[in-house]
Image: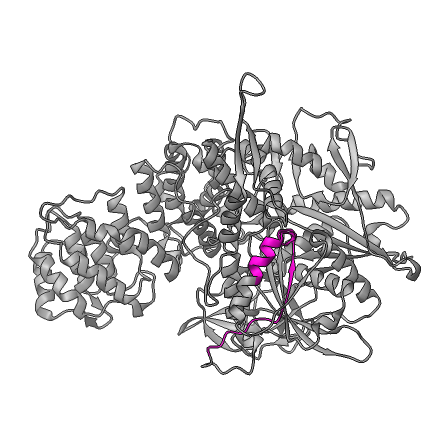
Amino acid sequence: MTMQKEYVIGIDLGTTNIVVSYCSLTPKDSDIKLFHIPQLVAAGQIEALPMLPALRYHYDQELTDEAVKLPWGSDDISSQLPNAVIGRFAQDLGNKNPTRLVSSAKSWLGYRGESNAEIHLPEKAPEGTDTCTPLEATSSYLAHIVAAWNHHHPKAPMQQQSVVITVPASFDDIARALTIEAIKRVGFKHFTLLEEPQAACYYWVAEHDTDTLKGHKHLMVCDVGGGTTDFTLIKIGKFSENSSVPELERIAVGDHLMLGGDNMDLTLAVRVLQKLEVEPTQRNMSQLLVQCQRAKEALLSEDAPEEMRIQLQTGGSSLFSGVKETRLTQKEVQQALLDGFFPLVASNSYPKTRKRSLTDLTLPYPADAAISRHIASFLNNEQSALNPEQAETDKQFVVPDVWLLNGGPFLSTQIQSRLQSLVEQWSADSAISWLTNPEPQTAVAKGATLYGRAKEQNQQLIKSAVVRHYFLKAVSEQGDQAICVLPKHSELNTVQQLQQVFTLRKGQKVQFDIAHSLAEQSYNLGETLAWHEGLHQLPGLVTQIEGENEVQVQIESSLDELGVLSVVLKELNSETRHELAFNLRTEQETDFNTLHNNIEKAFEAVNSWFGPAGKKPAKEPLRKTLEKLLGKRESWSGADARFIFDHLMSLASRRRRSETHERTWFNIAGFCLRPGIGFAGDTQRIDSVWSLYSQGIQFVQSAEIWAQWWAFWRRAAAGLSQEQQLVLYTDANHVLTANKRKKGGKVKVTAAIEEKIRLIGSLERLPVDIKKSVLNNISNQLSDKKVNKDMAWCAARIINRTMVYAAQELVLPAEEVTLLIDSALALDWKQNPNLALLAVSGAKRCGDEYAVADQLREAVADKLSGQATLLASLNGEKSALQDKQLWGDELPTGLVL
């Protein structure tokens, strides 16, 4: 017998804090209430607080069983994840010992850099300390809430109530799938996900006179929480006769931004560290973040003091000798937060892609912390939704006429005023209505409860549709194509069927590459376009079709109200259906039968070498250890190499411990990732490593590490997009002119000059005009004996008649290479063998044609006398040796280019 629901419960599953609200389904008692969550606040001391900090502290011997005892018995999650404290006490313990503190689990759920199952928190846990995945951490927070509720409501277990759990509107399909998995682990079978900005909107509507919305067209919800910022655009419809609330329809959401109040605290903490002239250790940061949060709230309040005192306990022989002190002024905070996060920018601004403002931790924070520019970018991308009647040639910028500001940072009237000034500057003569929630820190949880109650009572809800285009990759003669399988603005729970028929082989795993796009451009079901780098690729969809023969299928897709994508293969002339599931490990599972017999020992060697903090690396170099186990590294298979790389990537934060650690990490990781393409999961691997670029290296004085850094990016270059390659080119191209010697001038010295030159040559996706510029630079100095010999290798890659990995349209026109080959013929190839490679790359046959005149080609052939391999390449024959020379490394076995 199913128990009747008594309550609607809303859970704001925040990055920093978790809030729970509820209401009774009994009409006599329908007020929205906060559930004060019992939690440890000190050893043996329990208190019910309005928020549960989303934190876990993994203790060792410092706490007894009695000190961490809770009023309820241990649940399944707790038994699997023992020796942990959750909530306020965890926060206090973590401030003293941050290496044992798990934080930002929600952000890690949305991190696509590596398999969520392979992320272990805390990142810098001491040796012997238990760790957990972001999924496990999230489940443990929910388990704590469920146990606390059930302890107080034994006759109304939470799993049997109407439960609504909020997620960022910008969470992609994988983050939602992982959140759902965490919820199900706690025992929920019937629940609803609600986007946080919509929850904030429900709360505002319930608490205010909605006549304010009459005569307006669009509501922009700007939700800035502790760890994320969310934008949602809602269309305001007509008021019906039977309702005091207008029809509301969510029509657009923004990208997932890991920016919020926590990042503002971090910015202030970094400023204080600089003023105090102390190291940014985890212990120092933990102390300062708490004080900087208080300073932020006080110094940006309406009646703000001029300054606040900040103290840092640094140790010492007595209490006072170990304390450093400084002050944060109101002007400093305004400059850092108002100008840093909410600068007054033009309406056509877009976020910067290079400057990194938040360098702590390894989560992929946006390169640009200016929320203002992210808002401008979102509105620019949604102009056709804001004004569908606007002609494409009309440049007028349309701004939503109603704004709802939600989240803790907007408690500050100064931040509110700054954002209002910015938007009103954009809106010209249009009037803007500004809305705020009186209790932004609890508004999302209360809004979730209000939504759940409205749903139970069949009341009017905010309409929602699909907000992303979904594409599947298909291979064709024209290159990789993206087929639209679910267009943006499709109705939820409506199945869409492609007319195209696909033939699949039974008896093997089937995997489809899938991506989505927030672009406002209209695409129809089945419409195809070139698969391009602007699509947000998700982990593949996989299934296993049993049998031996081939089968013809059509693809059906839909999106449900939880935001879960369903893609099904339906056999023709049959009712048989095969549901595709996301591969949440972000890569195809490795067939362990293909790995080296000693791969587990190699795994242990890597783990030991990059062990916990304070542990010195082994005396024997890691490469030597791995070669003893696996053979010379040139012989490692692609599967072995990627297996080692994936583990190194999970330990990436540990590379900064010493010069030896950092040099070794980039050397082996780069070799194992080469050439950046060709193996299942390489797209996700490149996504994860690109976040390292903005972090740079730790030991900037080490020329050896700079060499390994640039070699790493050269080895990964084939997997990088044109935009990413342009970033690398911009940062490295100074070496092309550094070799020019001016009379009376000094040669500019730069670290890792050879690797930078070879990197530039490896960037095949650079536009043709840039390649021409590089070639001009090289040709003007090639005859100078003092010029680095790798200049010729760089030129060989640039003028190569067959792209090694890039599109053929990026090959330089034939006329561009003749002059360079002429110059090379006049030089001594024995002194620089790269000149021979240059001449062959530019003069060789491509298809049925030669790039240069017969006379020039014959001159190259004459000078190659005795070099059979290069002569064969000149005549258009495939040469493994030349491939190796052009890549710069032996390619791993098993590569599919």
Color scheme of the displayed model: one colour
Q: Quadrant of residue 96?
A: top right
- Image coords of residue 236 (percent x, y): 67, 74
Can residue 472 be seen from the camera position used here? no
Query: Is residue 756 in the magenta section?
Result: no
Tell me residue 843's x, y (percent).
Answer: 17, 64
Percent of width and height locating residue 543 = 60, 61
Residue 421 image-quadrant placement: bottom right
418 above or below 331?
A: below
Judged left or right of residue 98, residue 746 is: left
Residue 650 position (above or below residue 719): above
Quadrant assignment for the N terminus: bottom right
* Residue in the image at 22% along x and 70% along y: 813
Residue 426 at x, y = what percent?
51, 68
Q: Residue furthest top?
A: 317
**Magenta-span inclusion, residue 411:** yes
Where are the magenta residues, as a range?
395-420
Q: Residue at x 9, y 48 (%)?
A: 743
Rendering quarter of residue 84: top right
